[in-house]
Image (cartoon, rainbow, N blue to C red):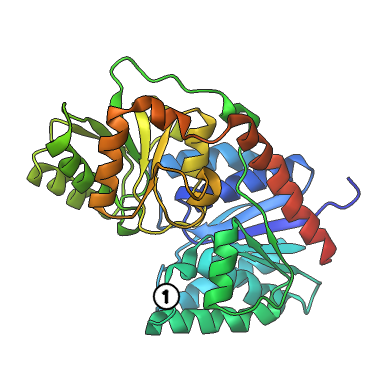
Amino acid sequence: METRLRIVHCFRAPVGGVFRHVRDLAEAQAADGHAVGFVCDSTTGGDYEARLFAEIEPRLALGITRIPMQRQIGPGDVSAALRTYRVLKALGPDVLHGHGAKGGLYARLFGTALRRVKRVGRFYSPHGGSLHFDEHSLKGKAYFSTERMLERITDGLFFVCEYEREAYIRKVGPIRTKSRIAYNGLRPDEFIPVEPVADARDLLFIGTLRQLKGPDIFIEALALAQQSANRKLTAVIVGDGEWESNCKNLVAQRGLTAQIDFRPAMPARSAFALAHTLVVPSRAESFPYIVLEALAAQMPVIATRVGGIPEIMGAENPVLCSPTPQGLAEKLITFDANRAALLAAMPNHAELQRRFSLKAMDEAIVSTYLQKR
């Protein structure tokens, strides 16, 4: 490889799909010979995320720098921004790639400031982020106006799916810089099937326990489905987050304590072995890794029809439903009674391997970096 880049990925929360995306991308870029580093929040994540940082840190030539970063705009942003700028200046990146709203803000503002010293490529991946806001709300209008202004100092936009690109155009406006769709990609070993354990539950929810991911929809849907099912449906909820106590209280209120088990965050493939079907009850998504990971492991999926999920499953797939307890309950009842129909509705495994590889994602992104240098 002739060109070796110094690449810094800037993002706020090292959790969930965004963290997975950045880790995989950084690992692939480091393997290609680039010097890579992270700058992210120090207050988000727990023991599981700490282990993930420890695993990848030896491969990051530019290291990992963690600074307190607030989710919402506030007084703490001033000190966080100053510290972030000093760190980035010391790292001397060729490319600053921001992920999510706050990471994108820092990457583009500080990348522009650093251009007084060297030409820094400024790139942004929304990953849903601010695009989840209602464009008619005051907060949404403020975010989208900011995105429009920041686009003037953006060398390239990366979208993880067509849905995300269309949402950006609808809410922010016509794209006036280079843009590219780079689907989330998986490693070859992730396409090996996962066998369920002997006492596997019927259903699995895995993810951060927060409103957007719909764990309450999952619990309420199971309660509704239970009224019509011929047997007791069982489930496991894997993850943690701000809604954890609320979810446990709701399970108790619906009389499902004996049927729903809670487990802490763990690797996705470990969680897949705990149940027979993945349920994704999200109210909103961009292009969730968890759907790709489950399908690659040959685990069937029932999901809400939101974000880029139909781009993975197929727009008319019968396993898709509205993000409501009633809509999800209907699917749980239907496919519990007809497992063969559920399996038949899953996308072709070989086609998934072709479309959603880590190699394809890495090549699409790095080639765009190089075009803008």
Element at label 1:
helix
- Is 41 left, or right, of 166 in this rendering? left
Residue 113 % position (x, y): 70, 79
Residue 62 % position (x, y): 68, 52
Q: Residue at x 47, y 23 (%)?
A: 194
Asked if residue 240 is positioned above or below residue 150 in the image, the reply reads above
Q: Residue at x 69, y 69 (%)?
A: 89
Q: Nearer the viewer, residue 269 or 201?
A: 201
Residue occupied by mark 1 = 76
Residue 28 % position (x, y): 70, 42
Asked if residue 244 is positioned above or below residue 76 in the image, the reply reads above
Q: Nearer the viewer, residue 212 or 238?
A: 212
Q: In which quarter of the view is residue 139 placed?
A: bottom left
Badge 1 amino acid: Gly
Q: How many marks?
A: 1
Q: Is residue 344 visible?
A: yes
Quadrant assignment for the N terminus: top right
Residue 167 % position (x, y): 53, 69
Q: Is residue 272 visible?
A: no
Near mark 1 (Cα within 10 A), the count class, few <14, some 14-19 or many ≥20, is few
Quadrant assignment for the C terminus: bottom right
- Is 178 left, or right, of 73 in this rendering? right
Q: Nearer the viewer, residue 228 or 234?
A: 228
Farthest residue to the top: give it. Answer: 198
Q: Residue at x 83, y 51 (%)?
A: 4
Asked if residue 11 is positioned above or below residue 244 in the image, the reply reads below
Q: Nearer the viewer, residue 273 or 27?
A: 273
Q: Residue at x 77, y 76 (%)?
A: 115
